Image (cartoon, coloured by chain):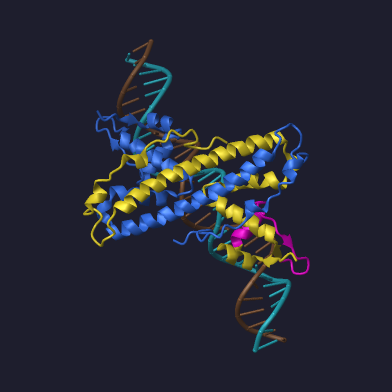
Chain colours: A yellow, B blue, C brown, D cyan
Amino acid sequence: MDKLLKIGEVAKQANITVETLRFYQSEQLLIPKMSNQSGYRLYSVQDQQKLNFILHSKKVGFSLSEIKQLLSLRTDKDQHTCEEVKNYTGDKIDEIESKIHDLQKMSLALSNLHNACCGGSESAKQCTILNSLDDPELFANSNNKTLGKNHD
Amino acid sequence: MDKLLKIGEVAKQANITVETLRFYQSEQLLIPKMSNQSGYRLYSVQDQQKLNFILHSKKVGFSLSEIKQLLSLRTDKDQHTCEEVKNYTGDKIDEIESKIHDLQKMSLALSNLHNACCGGSESAKQCTILNSLDDPELFANSNNKTLGKNHD
DNA sequence: CTTGACCCTAAAGTACACTATAGGGTTTAT
DNA sequence: ATAAACCCTATAGTGTACTTTAGGGTCAAG
């Protein structure tokens, strides 16, 4: 019932290398079970879902150590108090909402550029509509408290 | 009229170090003008807006070289054709929308955890509501084509 | 039964984004 | 005018996240 894939198959599906998967294991992020006859790694469906979570989280700017903490919320529930879980998830939700906000601003600014640009083969300098759109909003400060370096 | 700040003042406002600002200059990301009497860096308001853009972009997972390209859309318009600008912005908008989608899924999953958790001082293992919420959705594949390594 | 495509470990190397160090000049307050 | 608090360059070092190398074992096909 539980379909187990070998490392190469998982890597191919996720569009990463086998070395990256072995690295994630060495970092305690994704630990497959090992076949005891061949010594090969065997990844379950849950392992693959966990990998998807890791890759999506990386994409939006979370570090491997943050991802490890997020994953531990579900797998090491007995290590944390409810209070810790509640505070931690609350903080992460705020951080995520702030990232969404920033991305929406970027999307809007780029859409303005995209829509204003005629798309022709001439230099974008010639594209007068684009020139008239030198919108300082793109760089405007959205007054965000989570800007700058992380305070670990 | 144009208020110019020294590196330390800019660093403080942005909550980064002066070394990072000098590093961004060496990487051609943010080039302030230099005072010709003291040799000090002087940052204009536009420089500070550009810095905000850099920091916000970094936060949501863009690399410095991607950010450099995004910035060059506005500053080196004569180097690109309208077609290039239109294609590039179109691709970036898709990428941003995909990041927003991923973040919304994470936010939802964490909100479920957050709301289910009683927040008390006992171990989260005891929190039966949380236990019943072992939702595989958090790790589900959203079938996203931009997953995995970047294809530069 | 061997060959090619896979898998393994261990350890060294790399790219990116800073961060720290050494040695020195400038500005501002007392 | 001198000391603290800033600024400068140049270069070396660090942490993160892989990536490569070296030297082998496993497995399915012919």
Q: Magenta stretch containing residue A27, yes or no?
A: yes
Q: Is residue B136 left or right of residue B70?
A: right
Measured as percent of width and height from the top left, residue A104 is found at 44, 45
The quarter in which the N terminus of chain B is drawn is: top left
**In front here: B3 or A126?**
A126
**In front here: B52 or B27?**
B52
Q: Residue at x 62, y 46 (%)?
A: B109
When asked about the image quadrant of residue B17, the answer is top left
Measured as percent of width and height from the top left, residue A85 is found at 68, 38
Measured as percent of width and height from the top left, residue A74 is found at 69, 46
Residue B27 shows in the view: no
Q: Is residue B99 left or right of residue A10?
A: left
Residue B89 shows in the view: yes
In this view, D27 is above or below A120 = below
Measured as percent of width and height from the top left, residue B130 is found at 72, 42
In this view, B12 is above or below B139 = above
Q: Is residue B15 left or right of residue A44?
A: left
Q: Residue at x 54, y 51 (%)?
A: B102
**In front here: A92 or A62?**
A92
Q: How many numbered marks does the figure carry?
A: 0
The quarter in which the C terminus of chain B is drawn is: bottom left
In this view, B73 is above or below A87 = below
The boundaries of the magenta stretch are A19-40
